[in-house]
Image (cartoon, helix red, strand yellow):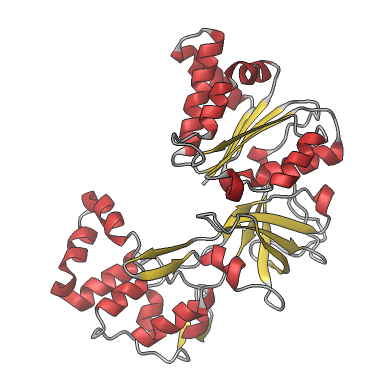
Amino acid sequence: MSTDPASLYSRKNPFPAAHTVNRRLSGGASEKETCHHEISLAGSGLIYEVGDSLGVFPTNDPALVDEILRAIKASGDELVLGSDGVQKPLRNALWKDFVITVPSKEFLAALVLKAGDAVADIAALTSDPTRKKELESYLWGREVIDLLLAHPSLAWTAEEFAKCMRKLQPRLYSIASSQKAVGEAVHLTIATVRYQSFGRQRKGVASTFFADRTGEGVPVPVFVHTAKHFRLPEDLATPVIMVGPGTGVAPFRSFLQERKATGGGGKNWLFFGEQRRASDFLYEEELLALQKAGVLTRLDVAFSRDQPEKIYVQHKMREASAELYAWLEAGAHFFICGDGERMAKDVDAELHAIVARESGCSAEDAAAYVEALKKSKRYKKDVY
């Protein structure tokens, strides 16, 4: 159950939570801005289990809303239909209802219709399904505001502009706490997205909502998203192996809090990776304290930029190949959390290699072994 039966709050009716802690985890010298956030669930009746995610409804940057309004020569008071079908001022709809960063197909189609030959390149890319990758490449780092500013003579009514906007969806963040340890609170580990492209500063909608635009008096609309596929084993004595570089460490922090609170004797092994130990070792003091207390049986860390050659979590797995396979043979559950594009694939490939190497079996038999882990729900992923 993701909510207490008495709780009135859900995705359709999110709880207006207070954002009580916003603490930077990464050091000043880090290339990243990773923060620890704490949200109060007091009075909500919401409960969660470790492995679950917190759904968050962010709002857009008001400064970007203002810039878009100026670009389409609107006051913001014009009434439009929001994504909920309710009529409201355009400014409110752009702030809370719509995606105003990534251009939608509808917006691009309207732009092509209005600008004609002036956007022949966009017209060619959007009209040919085989050029989808080229379109994605063209749009990378470009936002709605760029296309509006590039074609200032185009006339947009508030209504037609609103109709081109997609609904702003909630973001899901892996929960970084156990309710047994933190009570009516929930912790999150979020990398704040900020970057430059085409001469402009860009901001991730939800990550900068947490970093910059919440706090005292600004509620954070939240709900619990149940993740039954990413649960700790029911038998508290079962060993677990966790691979969570970067913000992928979040659910494993919750796992360790849970296992400390429940006892049970199950061994816990964490692989953590980041760029530099001095500035990017997220939750270093906590993890080392858990290791000293015996809750975290083994901690292997990989800091890719601390030496000439890049070292990642899969390299640390390879170094510990024999012991990792022994844990699997003893019934360990294997978890991955983090980047699904590259990291999870590299870790999966190394897991296959470890099984083949340590058991002396063929690649085909190793694949069957790993597939058996998945079927018995001993190999679990939370990737994004």
- The residue shown at (76%, 35%) is 291
> Where does residue 76 sit, x and y in percent of width and height?
46, 89
- The residue shown at (44%, 36%) is 308
> Where does residue 337 sit, x and y in percent of width and height?
58, 41
Can you say whether 337 is above or below 87 in the image? above
> Where does residue 282 sit, x and y in percent of width and height?
64, 48
Q: How many marks?
A: 0
Camera-side residue of 58 and 280: 280
Can you say whether 353 is above or below 265 in the image? above
Residue 155 in the figure: left or right of residue 306 = left
- The residue shown at (70%, 17%) is 330
Camera-side residue of 36 and 150: 36
Can you say whether 51 is above or below 119 in the image? above
> Where does residue 106 sit, x and y in percent of width and height?
33, 68
Q: Is residue 323 visible?
A: yes
Residue 302 in the figure: left or right of residue 70 = right
Q: Is residue 254 visible?
A: no
Q: Which quadrant of the structure image shows residue 358? A: top right
Q: Residue furthest left?
A: 117
Q: Which quadrant of the structure image shows residue 161? A: bottom left
Can you say whether 89 is above or below 134 in the image? below
Residue 41 in the figure: left or right of residue 55 = right
Q: Residue furthest top?
A: 360
